[in-house]
Image (tube, rainbow, N blue to C red):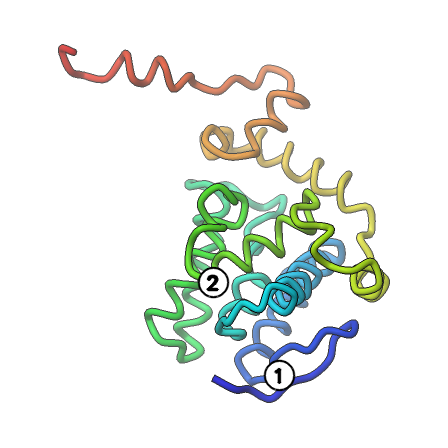
Amino acid sequence: MEYSERILAGVVVPDTELVRGAFEYAQHVYEPYLLNHVIRSWLFAVSLASVQNVEHDSEVVALGTLLHDVTLNRSFRGPRRFEVEGADVARSFALNAGVSISRAQLIWDSVALNSTPSIGLYKEPEVALCTAGICLDVVGLQYDQISAVVRKAITDAYPRLGMKAKMTSCFCHMVEVSPETTYDNFLRDFGLRYVQGYAEPSSVDLVMNAPFES
């Protein structure tokens, strides 16, 4: 499907009512460092698609990246892991905007799997691109796939604003207030390293204590 386009930081992105709405929503819900992060993730995802010649639904990739951290904040209280809570928000946003159920589900998967590249990278192209763009910005996955010129243009337009320290602080806060949502995702690692008294249940114990004879 072809859409109207515009250029952000040298990257050609779709310019549709749906994408503009998601962009405006992102500007409303995120603090500055997270807003820049989700925009960079979007631009990195689009850039990877161009370099790797990946056909994709560009509106789905836009919403999946722009909305992937809507529940990553200090007001988060669960009850489920933040990626799942955020995926529900993103899917509702898409459905309310008239997106089909199948496309909205791709957006849900993109958000829910954004921090699980061992799964997300092997899903549909839209999910894989969202995962790749987000992981590139957070941990540098596929960093060398994008030229230094493109990376600089994106980070100059949307600077990181001390993201590593600010994300770490946010992650630790979420571990402290809702530890049960962290045991099976990357937040556990921040809890183990930085949060005094944090301890996660062992998968071995869960297996051995299952209510069966053998």
Residue type at mark 1: give it. Answer: Asp
Q: Please say if 41 is above or below 135.
A: below
Residue type at mark 2: give it. Answer: Pro
> Tag on residue 125?
2
Q: Please say if 150 is above or below 180.
A: below
Compare residues 22 and 4 and report the one nearer the observer.
4
Q: Where is residue 90 in the image (x, y as percent from the top left)?
A: 47, 62
Name the residue at 64% across, 32% down. 172
The answer to the question of whether label 2 and label 1 lie on touching residues, with beta carbons closer than 8 A, is no
Name the residue at 71% across, 61% down. 40
Q: Is mark 2 on a helix, strand or loop?
A: helix
Query: Quarter of the image holding residue 39?
Result: bottom right
Compare residues 41 and 2 and report the one nearer the observer.
2
Compare residues 4 and 69 and report the one nearer the observer.
4
Q: Where is residue 183 in the image (x, y as percent from the top left)?
A: 47, 28
Q: Please say if 209 is above or below 19.
A: above
Name the residue at 64% across, 17% down. 196
Q: Is mark 1 on a helix, strand or loop?
A: loop
Horizontal relation, residue 67 to residue 208: left or right: right
Q: Mark 1 points at which residue?
A: 15
Horizontal relation, residue 172 to residue 206: left or right: right
Pick whichever of labels 2 and 1 is earlier in the sequence.
1
Q: How many marks?
A: 2
- Few, some or many residues within 10 Å of mark 2 (<14, 14–19, 20+): some
Q: Nearer the viewer, mark 2 or mark 1?
A: 2
